[in-house]
Image (tube, grey):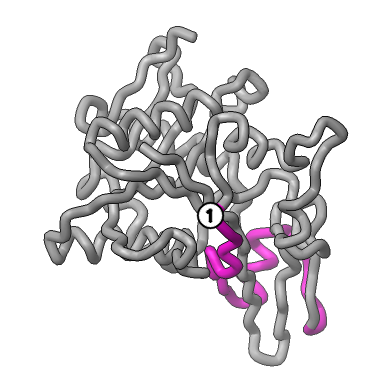
Amino acid sequence: MNYKLVTTIERTDLIEKGDEIVIDVWPEFILNDAVANEWFFQLYEKFPEFQYWLLDGEEIVGIGNSIPLFWNDKLENLPEEGWDWALEKGFRDKEKNLHTNLLCALSITVNPKYQGKGISTEMIISMVQIGKKHKLESLIIPVRPTLKKDYPLTVIEQYITWKREGGQLFDPWLRVHEKLGGKIIKVCSKAMKISGTISDWENWTGMKFLESGKYIIPGALEPVKMDVEKNMGIYIEPNVWVEYKL
């Protein structure tokens, strides 16, 4: 595939175009994580060499976001807070001038025009290349299993053990990592926390929440808890820590 890899250092003009694709691809509620709202858009300024695009000519094929961080413990002890933890920690580590040793993937988004063409594999390979270029030890990823949204009532610890007839992992996104040599470390059960008013959730989902309880929301990996009396809906998303040795 003759796709070109460029980072923010070379092409700051692609940020806005990439964001438009992200908004189209991801469920709206996912884009309202409080930690992301505070830190994510600073990635292009503070960590430009770790934000990248794959291009087909001038068309964006995929968008990749990652952040380096410092970790001096076993990877088995990575925190349950996953994505939220990694994003904030990367910025805090930079403020402390810590010598980073890991690269953490934050987002891989594939342009809908190019989905189904193996682009996700190319995006991971590109992120691995970036990690190696900066002499980091491992790439860690709080993976969001693609089809878990279709099985929101199944606990993720069980879901990730499901296999196809040939013995490969059932989930297609986890299967991509498996084929590329990624190793599942463990579940991070509180990778993202998204909260909002009942009105927020109704705007994000197009649904109505007239009484308190747990609701299955399109695109959510777990049921979302609504508390009408407190005017609050809370979604805790589980992910899966995966490692690539660099």
Identify the residue at horizontal 72%, vertical 79% (top origin): 226
Position of residue 156 relative to residue 139, above or below, is below
Residue name at image x 60 percent, y 50 percent: 144
Which x, y percent locates residue 196? 57, 74
| One can see residue 12 in this view | no
The quarter of the picture where residue 155 lies is bottom right
Residue extending farthest to the front is: 74
Any magenta on residue 188? yes
Nearer the observer, 177 or 16: 177
The amino acid type of the residue labelled 1 equals Trp
**Mark 1 sits on what residue?**
241
Q: Quadrant of residue 55?
A: top left
Residues 239 and 88: in front is 239
What residue appears at the point 71 percent right and 70 percent down from the top-left corner? 224
Q: Secondary structure at mark 1?
A: strand
Instruction: Quadrant for residue 169, please give it.
Output: top right
Chain part drawn in magenta: 185-212
Q: Position of residue 186 (x, y in %)?
A: 58, 59
The correct choice, above or below, for 3 with respect to 161 in the image is above
